[in-house]
Image: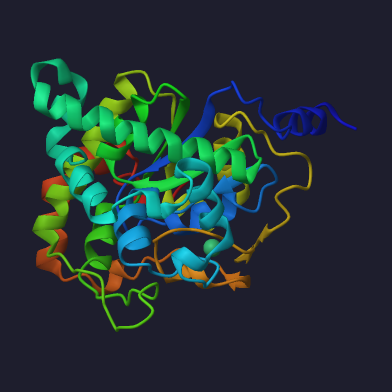
Amino acid sequence: MSATQLQARAAAEPPRPDEPVRLLYIGGLGRSGSTLLDRMLSRVDGICSVGELVHLWERGLVLNNRCGCGQRFRECPFWHRVGEEAFGGWDALDGREVLALKRSVDRNRFVHRMLLPALWPGYRARLDRYLELLGRVYEAIRRVSGGPLVVDASKHASHGFLVRRLGGVELRLLHLVRDSRGVAFSWTKPLRRTEVADRDITMKTYNPLRMSARYLSQNLLLHLLRRLGAPTVRVRYESLARDPAPELTRVLDHAGRPPAAGELGFVGDGWVELGPSHALAGNPMRFQSGRVPLRVDEAWRERLRRRHRLVTSAATWPLLLAYGYLRGGGRGR
Ligand SMILES: [Zn+2]
């Protein structure tokens, strides 16, 4: 057995109960490939990816939407066990009350309060209560999955700042970026929310100017999280979709779980083999399995209106430059 395999095996050993939960947190904007990345990572032994945990209370507990396994949240055996471990069952919680608590704590505009909660005693009390619930959920996920590494694809910067405050969680940030013009174009198109089992609902759309503002605020907050000491790796959606193996290797090295030789055999040239999942929320790819084609979606290059392209480029150029999208048309690595 090679040194890498030994290292991978050691990294896949079940964690001791007193060890912190090691959490790889995917931060970024929607429509940047986070579901794809999450589903790829879930193929690796010892990794439990839970999709977008930030939506647990609303889409899971309150609305009982469908899990990635196809079952409704409350019927899914994985989430049932997590609820049992964390709270003695989900019925111990009032979903709407927890959701209201979350909304009063977890917003990008409250990040300054998360950093200095002592200045806002009312906020601090709600924050402590919410962190206690979140901490129990992550710990329960670790216990139920038995794996040493949990992946959370929530993406929201504010949720990352909350996780940073959890004593029992060792945070590793994965900052996922995509060309802002691709993000803007994608958000002009409605996409069906397939997890809603009993109705036809499409995701919200945003105009390119509004999306550019979100692109700036979300990414700058993730830069701040890194400056505050969260170990961070940055991945470009385009590089991941074009040639996934090297990007996955970088991510897994960063998460302290380097892949063994041949372990990334589920990705190939232009395809990825997806396995079962209990991912909460995320795009419709959550429900696909088996071999699916993999290609970089750059439809914006032909289809994004000139006016929208100019607005987006002008508003987000410092980040486009920082992420390497203004060199050689951004088609490089
Ligand atoms: Zn499930």
The N terminus - image quarter: top right
Residue 52 showing in the rendered view: no
Question: Seen in the image, is 225 located left or right of residue 86?
Answer: left
Classify 175 as above or below 122.
below
**Farthest residue, direction top:** 118
Q: Write down the quadrant of residue 130 in the picture.
A: top left
Instruction: Write down which quadrant ligand 1 falls in.
Output: bottom right
Question: Seen in the image, is 111 located left or right of residue 168?
Answer: left
Residue 282 showing in the rendered view: yes
Q: Residue at x 32, y 77 (%)?
A: 192
Count of all numbered marks drawn on residues in the image:
0
Q: How far from the left and from the top, in percent, is residue 174?
A: 43, 37
Q: How far from the left and from the top, in percent, is residue 255?
A: 56, 32
Toward the viewer: 254 or 295? Answer: 254
Question: Seen in the image, is 297 located left or right of residue 221?
Answer: right
Q: How far from the left and from the top, in percent, is residue 322?
A: 29, 35
Q: Residue at x 37, y 38 (%)?
A: 134
Q: Write down the quadrant of residue 121 in the picture.
A: top left
Classify 130 as above or below 91.
above
Toward the viewer: 332 or 85? Answer: 85
Q: How far from the left and from the top, in percent, is residue 156?
A: 29, 44
**Farthest residue, direction right:** 1
Q: Write down the quadrant of residue 188 in the picture.
A: bottom left
Classify 36 as above or below 164.
below
Q: Residue at x 74, y 33 (%)?
A: 8
